[in-house]
Image: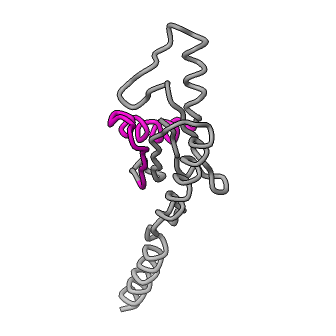
Amino acid sequence: MRIVPLSLVGLALAGAQAMAATPQPVTQQNVSLQLANALLDSTMAACHAEGRTAAVAVVDRGGNLIALQRDDNVGPHNTIAAQRKAYTALSSKTPTRLFGERARNNPDAPTSTLSMNCYCSAAAFRCGSAMKSSAPLA
C-alpha cells in the first residue's frame, strides 16, 4: 500500500515539471504600419529633395511586405525591386548599397539575382540589438 501513495506523489511531481517546461510564445518587436509609413514618407521626402523619384518598400522581420509607395511615372518593375531589396538587406543584414559598391569594384561579381538587384539600395534598421526591418529605395 505504501508504494501506491509514493507513485502518486512521483506522478504529481513529474506533471509539475512537465508543466514548468511547457514552451512559451516568443515575444518579438516588429515594425508597425505606422512606423513603416513614417519610414516611407521620410525616404520619399529625401529622394524628392534630391530631385529623384522612387519606389520604397518596408518589410517586417520575416521579410513580409508591410508598406510600399512609389512615385508617379515609376515603372512597375521598381515596386518589385524595392520589395526584393528590402528582403535582401534584411536577410543578409547588409545595406544593399554595399552590394552595389562591390559590383562596381568587381565587374565579374553577380549584379542581379531573383531577390537581389544591385542598382538600387536598401538598409535594414535595428531596434535594440535585433534586426527589425528594411526600407529600400529602388
Q: Is residue 95 left or right of residue 13?
A: right
Q: Residue at x 50, y 30 (%)?
A: 120
Q: Position of residue 15 (x, y in %)?
A: 41, 79
Where residue 103 appears, as percent x and y from the top left, is 54, 16
Residue at figure coordinates x 50%, y 13% from the top left: 109
Residue closest to the eye, 39 or 19:
39
Q: Is residue 76 on the magenta stretch?
A: yes
**Residue 134 locus on image (x, y percent):** 52, 46
Write down the region rendered in magenta.
66-93
Q: Is residue 132 magenta?
A: no
User: How many numbered marks appear?
Assistant: 0
Height in image: 94 above or below 31?
Answer: above
Q: Indicate left or right for 79 with 111 as reference.
A: left
39 vs 53, nearest the viewer: 53
Where, quadrant-wise, is the N terminus in this rendering?
bottom left
Q: Position of residue 82 (x, y in %)?
A: 43, 39
